[in-house]
Amino acid sequence: MSFEQEIVRLQDTLVVMAEIQRRQAEVQKMQAEGWTLHEQRMAHVDLRLAEITDKLDGLIGFTNGQFGKQ
């Protein structure tokens, strides 16, 4: 191969590498956004579970009071 051909080959390789890096950055951005959404959803689930637990504890206390008197 001639020197010019090697330069063209090297330039092509650099273009491919730049595209790979661009795509990888895009994937990392999507993963970060997905993780943020996951954390938001889990926070909501935790809040709902706390509310349900509180209601169940109240119901248990109420039924213990009703059935404990008999």
Image (cartoon, helix red, strand yellow):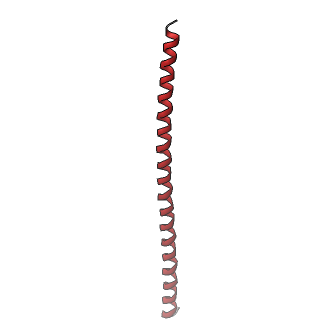
Please tell me which residue lies in front, 20 or 25.
25
In the rendered view, tell whether residue 67 sits above or below residue 31: above
Q: Position of residue 56 (x, y in %)?
A: 51, 26
Q: Residue at x 48, y 89 (%)?
A: 7
Name the residue: 50% across, 58% down: 31
| Residue occupying image coordinates x 47% and y 29% | 54
Please, is residue 22 above or below residue 61 in the view? below
* Residue 25, x across and y down, in percent: 47, 67
* Residue placed most toward the observer, 27 or 12: 27
Residue at 52% from the left image edge and 12% from the top image edge:
66
Query: Would you place residue 48 above or below residue 12 in this image?
Result: above
Q: Position of residue 61 (x, y in %)?
A: 47, 19
Say if 38 sits above or below 9 in the image.
Answer: above
> How many numbered circles are shown?
0
User: Among all residues in the image, which is located at the extreme top?
Assistant: 70
Which is more toward the observer, 27 or 46?
A: 46
